[in-house]
Amino acid sequence: MILGLLLLVVALCVALAGWAGWFVARDRAVILNQLWGAAVIEVLLLVQGVVAIVQGAGGGGASDPLLFWGYFATTLVILPVAAAWAFAERTRWSSVVLLVASLTVAFLEWRMWQIWMGA
Amino acid sequence: MTEPTEPTGKTAARRTGRGFGRVLVTVYGILAFAALGRSSYELVVKFGEAPVAYTLSTLAAAVYVVATFALAIGTPAWRVTAWITVGIEAVGVVTIGALSLADPGVFGESTVWSGFGQGYGYVPLVLPFVGLWWLWRTSRSTSEERTA
């Protein structure tokens, strides 16, 4: 994993969470631009995956690959599910879901870093 | 006489997977995924080290998965399933949490429910009670609308 990329993902997650939180406060449902934001994070997550594979192939992989890729799979699933809910639920609750989802991805990134470093 | 209701509150049969229920299902889903990932990892990699703890984790994971689906679908039949599974979680996290505090070595290793779900930010402790509240609340407003 590259620390800079990870910090970028976390920063974007926090920003998206803040945006969603603002929408919760204003009683609004998720809008498409927020989902584009989630899509950007999702692409960066995939880039992280490719980087991790390359690093792993070079012998510098995660200390516990199974655990690491388990977390990786989880981070990939969360935002698409939140996006699906956003289409189905056109109330402020979709914003709460996006808020929770973004913060969870940020938290999982931190855990992935810990696992990568062997903590 | 009207009570303040949520935007979805006026539909004839209140589904547990709508409105606030979506948030509940999301958090349940994440926890189910986390518990399932954890327990399959433990079963595959180190089951022999603490069979009791890892069997408990697997059980907890299964209950979370069923609860997530039951809450998401939310039809009357699934509502019963939701009551049972969410109830098991409430009892489980309190019981296992108390036992793990009384004797930290009782299960050999930590589980999802150890220390009242400490390893998961106490979400496993709070969630079942929020779930029970939500089930109670949605069932109550359904009957109110029937009698109204």
Image: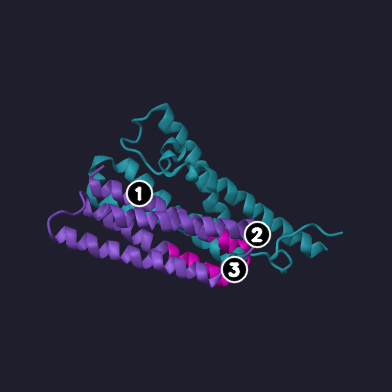
Q: Position of residue B77 (x, y in %)?
A: 59, 64
Marks 1/2: CA–CA distance: 30 Å
Circle 1: is it few (<14), some (14-19), or many (20+) Cα within 10 Å?
some
Question: What residue does disc 1 label?
Answer: A110
Visible in this render: residue B67? no
Magenta-drawn stretch, dominant element (helix, strand or loop): helix
Question: What residue does disc 3 label?
Answer: A89
Q: Colour of chain B?
A: cyan
Element on which disc 1 rests: helix
Q: Which residues are the magenta region?
A: A79-97
Check residue A91 for magenta coloring: yes
Residue, x 32% and y 55% (percent of image)? Answer: A6
Question: What residue does disc 2 label?
Answer: A26
Q: Answer with mark 1 or mark 3, whichever residue precedes in sequence.
A: 3
Q: Position of residue B43 (x, y in %)?
A: 28, 50
Labels 1 and 2 within one chain: yes
Residue reaching furthest right? B1
Quadrant of the image containing the C terminus of chain A = top left
Q: Answer with mark 1 or mark 2, whichever residue precedes in sequence.
A: 2
Element on which disc 2 rests: loop
In the rendered view, would you say B19 is above or below B61?
below
In the rendered view, would you say A76 is above or below B89?
below
> Three-letter amino acid code at disc 2?
Arg
Name the subunit of mark 1. Answer: A
